[in-house]
Amino acid sequence: MIETRSIGKRLTLLLAGVAALLSVLSWGMVTGLAREGAQRTQDNVLAASVTTIAETLRSEQGEVRLELPYAAFAMLGAISEDRVFYRVTAGDEILTGYDDLPAASPARPGQVVFDIADYRGVAIRMASIARLVLAGEGPVLVTVTVGQTRDGAGAIAAELSWLAAILAVVFFLVAVALSALVARTSLRPLNEIAAAMSRRGPSDLRPLSRPAPADLAPLLSALNRLMDRLRQSIRRSEDFIAEAAHRVRTPLATVRAQAEIALRSAKGDTEKERLRRIIRAVDESSRSAGQLLDHATVAYRTEDLAHDPLDLADLAARTVAAMEPTASMRDILLKLETEPARIAGDAILIENAIRNVLDNAIKYSPEETTVSLRITSAGDEARLTVRDQGPGLGDEPVEALTERFRRGQNTESIVGSGLGLTIAADVLRAHGGRLELGGNKNGRGGACVSLVLPLA
Amino acid sequence: MRILGLALGVICGIVQGAAAFAIEIEDHRHYAGTGERVLRIVSTTDLNVFEPYVTAFQGLRPDVSVDYTVVSSSELHRAMRAGAAFDLAMSSAMDLQFQLANDGFSRPYRSAATEALPDWARWRDLIFAFTTEPAVVVINSARFEGLELPATRQELIAVLRDNPERFSGAVGTYDVRDSGLGYLFATQEDRSSDAYWRLNEVMGRLGPRLYCCSSQMIDDVAQGRLAVAYNVLGSYADDRLAEDRSGRMQILRMQDFSNVMLRTVIVPATAEEIDAAGAMIDMLAGLGLRSQAGDWPLPALSQTGPRESSGFGPIRLGPGLMAYLDPLNRRAFLSEWENAMEQR
């Protein structure tokens, strides 16, 4: 699988990118507005100042007269500590003020106009107002100009811009945190489905029937269709195996019966030995076919597992009774120590598991030995321990020994299919239990297989 | 004692630093230091008043010589505008100082000491105030014998009006045409009190004597030539009162309104000894913020004795000060003032 960048990361990055863009945009806008606002505040004060001065314009004895009110200047110092310049002109003549102040833009009388100019090496904001005053021969256009450096407005704008920058960064960080949260929340259904899938047992192929967002419905139904096909395919092959095993077993029984008859009537030792070998081979084939059937049964029944209340002791006793003849043929004593252990499950499957384990134990035990079965309960688990005095299981891990068609390393001389422990392990796993394998700790070798099942 | 070890400078018509300009100098002294550097101060503060500050400064910076020139406030303003070379300009005429700063004749200075000054005691790091000094009325109590002492301008007007023969020719005030500080006090009073012009009318009828400087007015009151000196610098009057033996001099603080002036200092744009000038400003700002009155001739910024509880803040250091400096306004104000004062 080629792993590309996770959707969650990609979503977070994308959202963070959007947030960064918005932060920068909002900072830029606030900075612009702050500059504009500070400029307007200064303009208003300047406008008030020039208007106040222009109010005092009058004509006396044919001359333009005015006074510069204290308030007109004092108000300029109210907001900021900016330097102040002013000029009053009547026509082309300068009445008072700073004569080198830059000229203001022309305006209609009565209208306040604003200019930005460079004066004595610093940028200033100027407000001008023109008024017509009747003096001498005719009306004279008197212009009042008041200028102020822009440090105060600049400082206010810079301060607000700085504040906006801090807020934008905070906004960005909050947005990133929220983006991560959003990405995680949106991906939760997907993760839940993945978790549900990985929680499933290896043979659980039931369709997923959990609620899922509409976006995930196609994925989910495709997945379910795939699992359905897989299940059907597995079922078909199991059916095929069961059918094949069944078909093989009947003729094998016939072959065995005929071989036994032939053995009884045989004379020569070599012939007898040959027939015995045939019988043994047929037995092994028959057992293998049986186990294949068992395996198919287990696969089939675990799909829809029954939860009947059962006593493990009963099941063990029944299985022991059924195996007794096989054991006694080889003079093997089956010893059963039980105590009641209530469990829930499928009686046929559990008997099947016990039988396979017991069958293994009998098969690998030397003649005239004992196989002991013991039921104990500890905590919320029931444990059926089967011990034999055979060669043991070697030191391979449980996973390897319960693999299908896999046989232990020390079983060369004995025939077997390698399915027995697989079947037992499958059954126990389907019931929420497990198969534990261990050496016989009694100092005589031998295998110790435990079937562990949860108590009901 | 104070001047022990200090070289007495030569008073001359033209000071070295202002070689290119003829400045009318009232007083001059050179306080030699151990090093080469010379801090050139031009000031309106009388030499004897400022000498303790120079001594204190040379205690901190013995390497710096101090060249101290006393001029009138309008002369100082004119010299600065003409580009006279000084490292520090100190004046009691706030308006003229403010205009110099506003018009770019001072250079900015910033230090921890100037940052500590209250907002109203500095402007744009260009101009710094280090004293608050009220305008007061100084009287010769012998001339007031049998009269109730006035506490407001109304009462002063009534006393002067009712006793023309007693006060004729014995009333003194600033000649606002010459004195920058006198003009500042007069214009601020014009703005704040309607009694000012009526007082001027009454004084004008009594044939007032007009002065350039507070110290001369105080001298004349002490010697009995004047009965009343109106708008005198309180700090000078306090110093003189302490030395006065006659016991006839008395300081009256008008209760209705009282101007409080800030003595300000700027570093002129022509300054060369920036470092020493800054050190002097730091020292003055530190002294301006002292909490104890101490043995200094000039009051601190926050100094409020029992007399100073009138509740009037100092004159605001801001562009409003420029309104009365406008030539049109000044001409109009002076003509009105002359009309009131010169009735004979």
Image (tube, rainbow, N blue to C red):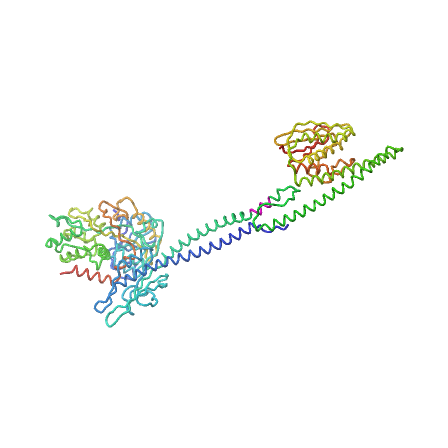
Q: Which residue is found at the position 70% from the left and 45% from the top?
A: A234
Q: Nearer the viewer, residue B93 or A139?
A: A139
Report the front residue among A289 and B127: A289
Residue A68 location (% of width, % of height): 26, 61
Q: Predominant secondary structure in magenta?
A: helix
Confirm whether the magenta stretch covers residue A335.
Answer: no
Side (left or right) of A73 relative to A297: left
Asked which quadrant contains residue B78, the reply is bottom left
Return the residue nearer the eye: B156 or A259. Answer: A259
Q: Is residue A381 left or right of residue B32?
A: right
Q: Quadrant of the C terminus of chain B?
A: bottom left
> Looking at this rendering, what residue extends furthest in the right direction?
A267
Q: Residue furthest left?
A: B165
Location of residue A327 by image quarter: top right
A373 to A158, vertically: above or below = above
Residue A192 magenta: yes
Q: How many marks overall? A: 0
Provide the residue span drawn in magenta: A188-195
Side (left or right) of B301 relative to A199: left
Identity of the residue drawn at 47% across and 55% down = A22
Does residue B4 sit above or below A138 in this rendering?
A: above
Q: Position of residue B248 (x, y in %)?
A: 15, 47
Q: Position of residue B174 (x, y in %)?
A: 20, 56
Residue A50 at what x, y percent from top left?
30, 62
Q: Quadrant of residue A115?
A: bottom left
